[in-house]
Image: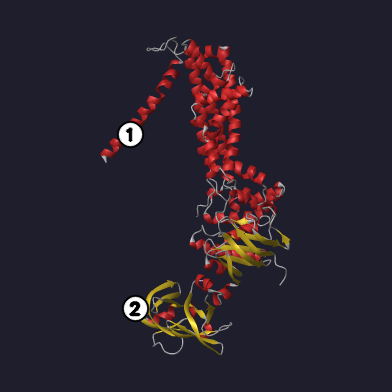
């Protein structure tokens, strides 16, 4: 791997009472689209602000191309940020907003306008050049904020939940545009979001944070298929988690004693009998049938509700012990089952489609 | 509903009556300043600008007007400047004793002007600053800073909290962010504060009376005139002071309400 563009080396950020970021190590490569994802208060925005120099790490080092950045003032860096609140200048025209970064770098007037206009054109908002910010729609403002940040042609663009103020249909479109823009520019995007669907849709790699700690970093598929711990498995959404204890181990499989019977799971890490573990079964790996619950990894349950998302349906099935199990299947696969509320069904999955996590 | 209409009309009538009650004395003075009769009485003796001519011909009045203008302009600029720095300090920084700092900053207008004037006189006499126009300027600056600070503080509170940091993030040093973002954003409030503090200084007489020495301002001159004789000139000067102060106050409101554009907070789409 080439020298990463940005290195966060053991970053700690402490405030008076609490620690916002706790020993964060993260390498960000040149040209990658990385998402920092986690629930609110997990330290993702603080991390982004430290990269921009708006906060100073209490410990650790931030290096950009090998250069220590901790003491570099925000205005001496080239790490533009697209703010959640956009923070556009309301007393300036669109063009003046976009020119701002160049003006602060003392680029001459005509050159400034030329470069700002080329970004306005690229983002399809050139016709608004003389408008005031409050005369623009949410999507248009979003583009102005992007143009303003990109006008200095930085190596890295920071984005802090930039789409959170937009309508749902615009969010999807802007995600696609951002992704496309990042690929065309070939620069690094560091994108903070609390939304799993957003992070997974848009990023090459996702870093999941919780309570100031990094939980897992990897491509979306890896995080989805192999969550590193219980937090990730729960946060990522469509997972079923069953707690239990290892009864025996054989041939790469673990027999796990759970309140729902003994279940087989793939054992690809150092485990021994008696270990408390959690089995993770992704909702889309569950096979639903109306036969009897026989053989390994089969649970019987009662349909509680259905959730339609276009071609897919998520079934919520009560499997006893107050536990609701999720199964995701295609609409056409569900139809012959006639799965209505209260219907008894059987849920199955293959042991190799499970992940086993050590419980603390 | 009929009753609603009746209540609405009654309320409006009540407000107009209250306003009439408040403005009647000023209106009377204004009307009689154009009266040809020497003593204000009904019937009106005909339209005349004689008292204005006489007032301007009086060298003491002319000097008072000049003094008032100098003091008003100087103290409004200083008070707005200090008011801005105080409001910005409050906006930007958290520090020990901030609540006390704010409470103290807003104290002067709550002190009776007689006491403030007397205290100013005693203090300025001690430090050899009393008796000049600058004495009135100093006193009026102290008195009007809170008005300027309150207006600018209000405007700063409407500013998107990320805006200044956004300027830094785009390469603006703290000074450039101040001049390129904070000041343009607060400009309506700054102008408004200038006009308002000018008005405050323009018709303030109590403090000015204490500290002015021989450099009388116009309101002090009116007081003197009233003590010596009852001349219709007083109506003329009074009306003039009123019109100027009102104009300034209205300008202050207009720039603040009309010139202040959106707060820059994201409103969604």
Q: CA distance from mark 2 to mark 1?
A: 64 Å
Residue under the image location 60 percent in, 38 percent down: B85
> What is the x, y in percent for residue A288?
43, 82
* Chain holding disc 2: A
| Residue in front for this viewpoint, B33 or A315 | A315
> From where the camera sits, is residue A341 visible?
yes
Q: Report whether A16 appears left or right of A2.
A: left
Q: Report whether A62 appears left or right of A17.
A: right
Q: Is residue A17 above or below residue A357?
A: above
Q: Which residue is mark 2?
A: A342
| Residue in front for this viewpoint, A249 or B167 | A249
Report how many numbered discs are placed on residues in the image.
2
Quadrant for residue A35, please give it: bottom right
- Secondary structure under the numbered disc 1 in the rendered image: helix
Residue under the image location 55 percent in, 46 percent down: B159
Residue under the image location 70 percent in, 53 percent down: A76
- Circle 2 crowding by C-alpha within 10 Å: few under 14, some 14–19, many from 20: few
Q: Is residue A108 above or below residue A46?
A: above
Q: Which residue is mark 1?
A: B11
């Amino acid at each position: 791997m080439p020298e990463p563009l940005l290195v966060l080396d053991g970053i700690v950020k402490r405030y008076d009472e609490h620690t916002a970021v706790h020993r964060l190590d993260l390498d960000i490569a040149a040209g990658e689209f990385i998402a920092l994802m986690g629930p609110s208060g997990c330290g993702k925005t603080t991390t982004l602000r430290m990269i921009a120099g708006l906060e100073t790490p209490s410990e650790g080092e931030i290096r950009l191309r090998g250069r220590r950045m901790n003491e570099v003032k925000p205005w001496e860096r080239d790490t533009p940020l697209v703010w959640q609140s956009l923070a556009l200048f309301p007393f300036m025209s669109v063009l003046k907003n976009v020119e701002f970064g160049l003006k602060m770098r003392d680029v001459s007037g005509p050159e400034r306008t030329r470069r700002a206009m080329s970004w306005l054109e690229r983002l399809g908002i050139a016709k608004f050049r003389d408008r005031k910010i409050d005369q623009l729609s949410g999507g248009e403002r979003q583009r102005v904020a992007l143009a303003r940040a990109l006008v200095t042609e930085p190596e890295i663009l920071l984005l802090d939940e930039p789409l959170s103020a937009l309508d749902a249909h615009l969010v999807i479109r802007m995600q696609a545009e951002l992704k496309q823009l990042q690929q065309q520019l070939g620069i690094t995007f560091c994108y903070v979001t609390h939304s799993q669907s957003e992070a997974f849709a848009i990023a090459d790699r996702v870093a999941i944070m919780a309570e100031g700690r990094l939980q897992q970093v990897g491509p979306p598929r890896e995080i989805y298929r192999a969550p590193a711990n219980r937090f990730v498995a729960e946060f990522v959404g469509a997972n079923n988690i069953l707690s239990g204890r290892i009864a025996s181990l054989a041939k790469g499989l673990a027999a796990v004693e759970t309140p729902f019977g003994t279940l087989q799971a793939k054992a690809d890490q150092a485990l021994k009998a008696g270990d408390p573990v959690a089995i993770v079964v992704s909702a889309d790996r569950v096979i639903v049938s109306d036969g009897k619950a026989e053989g390994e990894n089969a649970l019987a349950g009662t349909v509680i509700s259905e959730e339609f998302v276009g071609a897919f349906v998520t079934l919520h099935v009560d499997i006893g012990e107050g536990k609701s199990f999720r199964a995701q299947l295609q609409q056409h696969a569900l139809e012959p089952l006639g799965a209505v509320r209260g219907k008894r069904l059987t849920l199955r999955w293959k042991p190799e489609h499970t992940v086993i996590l050590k419980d603390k | 509903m009929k009753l609603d209409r009746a209540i609405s009309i009654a309320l409006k009538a009540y407000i107009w009556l209250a306003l009439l009650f408040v403005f009647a004395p000023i209106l009377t003075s204004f009307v009689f300043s154009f009266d040809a009769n020497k003593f204000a009485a009904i019937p009106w003796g005909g339209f005349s600008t004689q008292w204005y001519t006489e007032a301007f011909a009086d060298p003491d009045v002319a000097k008072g007007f000049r003094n008032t203008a100098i003091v008003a302009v100087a103290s409004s600029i200083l008070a707005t400047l200090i008011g801005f720095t105080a409001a910005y300090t409050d906006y930007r920084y958290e520090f020990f004793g901030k609540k006390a700092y704010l409470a103290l900053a807003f104290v002067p207008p709550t002190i009776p002007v007689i006491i403030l004037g007397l205290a100013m006189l005693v203090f300025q006499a001690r430090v050899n600053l009393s008796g000049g126009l600058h004495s009135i300027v100093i006193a009026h600056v102290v008195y009007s800073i809170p008005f300027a600070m309150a207006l600018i503080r209000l405007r700063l509170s409407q500013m998107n909290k990320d805006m200044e940091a956004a300027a830094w993030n785009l390469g603006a040093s703290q000074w450039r962010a101040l001049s390129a973002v904070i000041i343009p954003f607060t400009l309506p409030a700054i102008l408004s504060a200038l006009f308002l503090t000018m008005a405050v200084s323009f018709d303030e007489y109590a403090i000015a009376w204490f500290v002015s020495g021989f450099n009388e301002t116009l309101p002090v001159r009116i007081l003197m005139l009233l003590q010596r004789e009852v001349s219709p000139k007083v109506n003329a000067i009074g009306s003039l002071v009123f019109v100027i102060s009102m104009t300034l106050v209205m300008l202050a409101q207009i720039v603040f309400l009309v010139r202040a554009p959106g707060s820059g907070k994201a409103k969604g789409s």
